[in-house]
Amino acid sequence: MSHPLVSVIVPNYNYARYLPERMESVLGQTFRDFEVIILDDCSTDDSRQIIEEYRGNSKVKSITYNESNSGSPFRQWFKGIEEARGDFIWIAESDDSAKPDFIEKMVKGLQDYPSAVLAISGTHVIDENGKRTTQTFDRWDKSDEQGEGFVKLYDGRKYLIHNLYWACYVYNASCVVFRREAFFKDDYSRSLTMRNAGDWLFWSRLLCHGDILEVREKISFLRRHSGSVTFAGNKSGNLLKEDAVVVKAIESMVDVGRYRRMIRHGEMLKRIARMDIAEDLRRQYRQEVKDTLGASEFEYIVERVNKLFSKYLPFLITSAKDLI
């Protein structure tokens, strides 16, 4: 396979218990023109033993074991992307899973819409044992006539302003397929210094170079468990600090507008005010976020007033109403 259409990158760190399900979900795809790149970040569990079982598979292009832990999951992403030969990239996180037609439907969407640099699918949430929970990620507008089962294209920069500026609506890497060529059009190195929000920044930079396609079917499975990086980031407060970095970065990529920026800054400060943490830690977080964003207490007041009057004045900006 000299030039596969899709490169599937499987980054792993201590997820031996989930690896068999993940690998079978990749190798069992109905779309067959793909290669698999497995990257292990110096796992201390039985991951190597499980990974070696796939060494002889014709779809597995390479297996790499780090001698020391990289300290960031995004370093593994970049290593895999640079090694990849496919036109499209799927970063299949080792603790997640997917339906057999995931690649088929994602690639078809990207081929049908050449302006799209990435496609995102809907997602079922599963627990540690692989059982579906009641939670799903399918943020598309249910009142839209093109709801479930359709695809819809959005302008990348507008999606940044109205969606990603408020939250990382690209839920996780496992529900995304993107064009490899777009990776080489920007500098994504800032993500390498991040542990939690590097993916949010990565998707945001990608969207400066094209559009985004929503594949409105839940064909991916996101596993929620206490060992995840996101869980640890929320607990330590690092996620909050990195979120502020991403918000600031998006403001440098696109013109979000002065009023929208004030509301977003105020929301960040409100989030800190509502955290269940010690008061001295709250003051520390508040100051760090203020310094990162250039935010002020006035913006906090503006957000609170905006929230109050948005009940009666629907044209006002709020994170819930601003989505496209």
Image (spheres, rainbow, N blue to C red):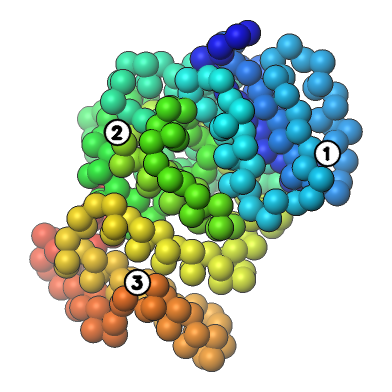
Asked whether, in this view, residue 26 is left or right of residue 89, the answer is right
Which type of secondary structure does the marked residue at label 3 adopt? helix
Mark 1 lies on residue: 47
- Image vertical order of residue 282 relative to residue 119, above or below: below
Q: CA distance from mark 2 to mark 1?
A: 37 Å
**C-alpha separation, residue under disc 2 versus residue under disc 3:** 27 Å
- Please indicate, yes or no, whether residue 130 appears anywhere in the rendered image: no
Q: Residues within 10 Å of mark 3 (few under 14, many from 20)?
A: many
Quarter residue 32 falls in: top right
Mark 3 lies on residue? 293
Q: Position of residue 253 (x, y in %)?
A: 29, 52
Residue wearing tag 2: 211
Q: Badge 1: how crowded within 10 Å, few (<14), some, or many (20+)? A: many
Question: Depth check: 224 or 210 in front?
Answer: 210
Which of marks 3 and 2 precedes in the sequence?
A: 2
Residue 127 vs 117, above or below: the answer is below
